[in-house]
Image (cartoon, rainbow, N blue to C red):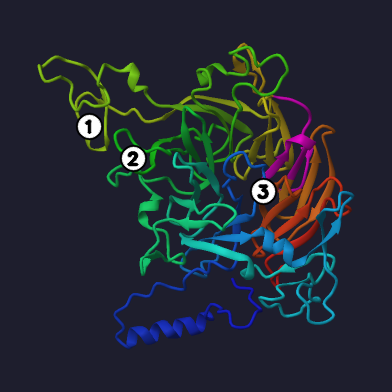
Amino acid sequence: MSHRNTEGRSRPLPRRLLTATLLAGVLGGCNDPNTGIDAPVDNFFFPEGLLLDPRTPEGDAEPEAAKYLFVSNGNNDLNYNGGSVTVIDLEAFFEAWSDTRVDAEGNEVPTYEPYPYCEGPGERCVLDVGARTTDDFPCRRLGLLPQVVECDEAPFVVDGVRLGDFSTHIAASKEPSGTPRLWIPVRGDPSVTFIDVKGSLPGPPDLDCGQRQVDGEADDRSRCADEHRLTHLRNDRSLDELPREPFNVHVSESEDYRYAFIAHASGPALSIIDLDGLSGDDSQPAIVDINNIFSPTIGTVLSGGFGLATRPCGACGVEGEEEDPGFNQPDVTQGCTRPLVYSSLRFQLLATSFTASGIDPDALPSGAVERDGCEDAQGNYLGPFCATPDQVGQECAILCEPQVRNVVRFPVGGVDPLSTVSGEALGDVHFGDACGDELYVLQTNPGALLRLDTSLDGGEPLDIPAGRPIEVCDQPTRFQIWEDEGLAFVACFQAAYVYVVDLRAEQVVDTVITGTGPHDLVFDELRGMLYVANLLEGSVSVIDVGLDRPTRFKEVARIGLQEPFSR
């Protein structure tokens, strides 16, 4: 899937020509195996996951708008030999097409309105509809919506790496070294790829996933190394493989724990990754548990999970309550030392909550971490000890890594889909407030946004439906919440819209046209922008959601040129 119209850029070979080329290689006695067409890193092809640059300014510097956007490309039509992650320079993108104004203090501020049509050579301008873009002039008016600017993504790409087919969503963790790390489920070869985001701001990120070295430097266009792929329980190929369809990833970390949770779109499994690795071996993160919490009930034959969110724990800004050490601490979290995670079942109107925790070595007999047997040197029996990877199966060796615990399943209410035997029922989940008292769940069939009361009653969350369902578009899957403004943005894949929902008024207040197949969303609060991955169009819609601009709740631009067949 290529949409290049800029001279000098390669396109994939037509399938008939590709077949002829392969036959010629075989008949000619070529010994090199065909590896297919390498995935481009400067081109969107089925963009599925979005994430703003997780790097933060050093020291006490004021927060700044993210300079870069990460996009995972799924290669859903298998046109290439894998997917990719592409890094977009957002500042250069906005600079290429948006105009500015001078405010009352004399500061130049962006208006996010496009420059005029080009009337001749100039430093910056927006080309007319259908004009051929170049690296110098990468932006033009969109064909059916000339008030919207579309820009070729290639001139704004600053880095990228290749990974497997059908990569999905992106989450980020903050490693002890200070380097952020990306986590991306890959469905084509069930695995989770992790990528380190190196480089300091304000410079561009340097993605490192163990790529091939060329002349002593990483080849950023080669595929991520196997050492950056998690495929088996405890990184042991003799143990269980990661189940099929790893789809959504959620990182939950605090001073006491660092986990990533993987929901599988098909099948009953939830997988847990300990970001700090196995006991006695902290060199690499590891899958430490695969638990069937999404198993079907009598109402359906299908199983799978989707949304994931950690309930906020501890002080949350309610006046006078922060003094109470037990305030906003669900009992199951044991004083916020382990997470309380909520998830949705894909094929039933049910949600589940659970926690994850390991065995505290301090609770075991003395030396339980260092020992490698049941007895000491004098033959005294000391009991169990935490097993390192090569000690699993030995007498008295136990697994101390995190495991799923305290699973609770409950109904979410919603609109009866009339048939519970097949078809998707629920999608994304997000908490709507800082205390975690409101959980929003997206129903996909029929489309509705549901609210649950997850406030504490004697240390236990209520987990009951609250308020009426807010009807939205058909078959939505992902949404984002702007907590300060009480707004939710729902991606409508089939309708090619984003619905804007006022959560306080419990109603849809606007709809915004996007590209074809909007899926993932990410909210850029400091710019007042919403980025939406258009899976079927190879573009990212840029929607203005700022409070004081005339283009509020309008699509103002797209990163990526619209495909001819998109509309």
Amino acid type of the residue tagged 3 in the rendering: Val
Numbered disc 3: secondary structure? strand
Instruction: Classify 164 as above or below 268.
Output: below
Badge 2 or badge 3: first in the primary sequence: 2
Is residue 466 shown to the viewer in this render?
yes
Between 205 and 356, the residue placed more toward the observer is 205
Q: Which residue is mark 1?
A: 393
Residue 188 lies in the magenta stretch: no
**Direction from residue 53 to residue 37 in the image, left or right:** left
Label 2 to label 3, Cα distance in Å? 32 Å
Instruction: Classify 259 as above or below 566.
Output: above
Disc on res. 213 = none
Residue 479 lies in the magenta stretch: yes
For the record, the magenta segment spans: 465-489
Looking at the figure, which quarter contains the C terminus? bottom right
Looking at the figure, which quarter contains the N terminus? bottom right
**Direction from residue 375 to residue 205 in the image, left or right:** right
Label 1 to label 2, Cα distance in Å? 13 Å
When asked about the image quadrant of residue 250, the answer is top right
Q: Residue at x 73, y 63 (%)?
A: 95
Q: What is the x, y in percent for residue 236?
A: 29, 44
Amino acid type of the residue tagged 1 in the rendering: Gly
> Which one is closest to the eye, mark 3 or mark 1?
3
Amino acid type of the residue tagged 2 in the rendering: Arg
**Residue most extreme to the front:** 106
**Direction from residue 191 to residue 517 in the image, left or right:** right
Q: Which residue is mark 3?
A: 522
Q: Residue at x 57, y 43 (%)?
A: 58
When asked about the image quadrant of residue 466, the answer is top right
Numbered disc 1: secondary structure? loop
